[in-house]
Amino acid sequence: MPWLEPGLGMDRFASLLRYPGKIEVQRPAQAATSAVLLVIGQSNAANLGQRYQSPDDRVVNFSEGHCYIASSPLLGADGEYGESWTLLGQKFIGSGLYTKVLLIPAAVGASGVRRWQPEGTSIGWCWR
């Protein structure tokens, strides 16, 4: 897409695949104290809010087989602003409820419910 800023990459559904400043880390080992959050939906899940950044690799963003320290905007959702899921992950860590949080976004801002049905455009990634 020629209009993209340098360092940005998007798939055919306009979900972010690359964004400047992302720090790749190892995928966290699965444990009973790990949380995996599948973040799907519309605006509140799709990088259209306030920006947050995890201070370390205890809250990570999984996208395209790689993990990154979670920071807004999250890869895997559309939108280039912020989200609340990184903050939620930090709160889970801070409360002692979990030691690691893995965020897997798949969200499209301003999408209608029909787009999330099998014939819709927002979930085409599920059927590849």
Image (cartoon, helix red, strand yellow):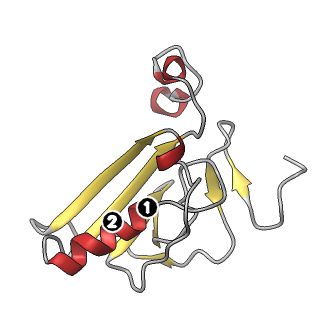
Name the residue that disc number 2 marks.
Answer: 88
Residue 14: image quadrant is: top right
Residue 35: image quadrant is: bottom left
Q: Secondary structure at mark 2?
A: helix
Circle 1 packing at 10 Å, graded few (<14), some (14-19), many (20+), is some
Count of all numbered marks drawn on residues in the image: 2
The residue sitting at 17% across, 76% down in the picture is: 95
Residue 26: image quadrant is: bottom left
In this view, which residue lies farthest toward the front?
50
The residue sitting at 65% across, 61% down in the picture is: 18
The vertical placement of 14 against 84, above or below, is above
Q: Secondary structure at mark 1?
A: loop
Name the residue that disc number 1 marks.
Answer: 84
In this view, which residue lies farthest toward the top?
119
Q: Nearer the viewer, residue 24 or 54?
A: 54
| Amino acid type, mark 1 | Ser
Query: In the shown orientation, is residue 52 left or right of residue 7?
Result: left
Query: In the shown orientation, is residue 34 left or right of residue 6?
Result: left
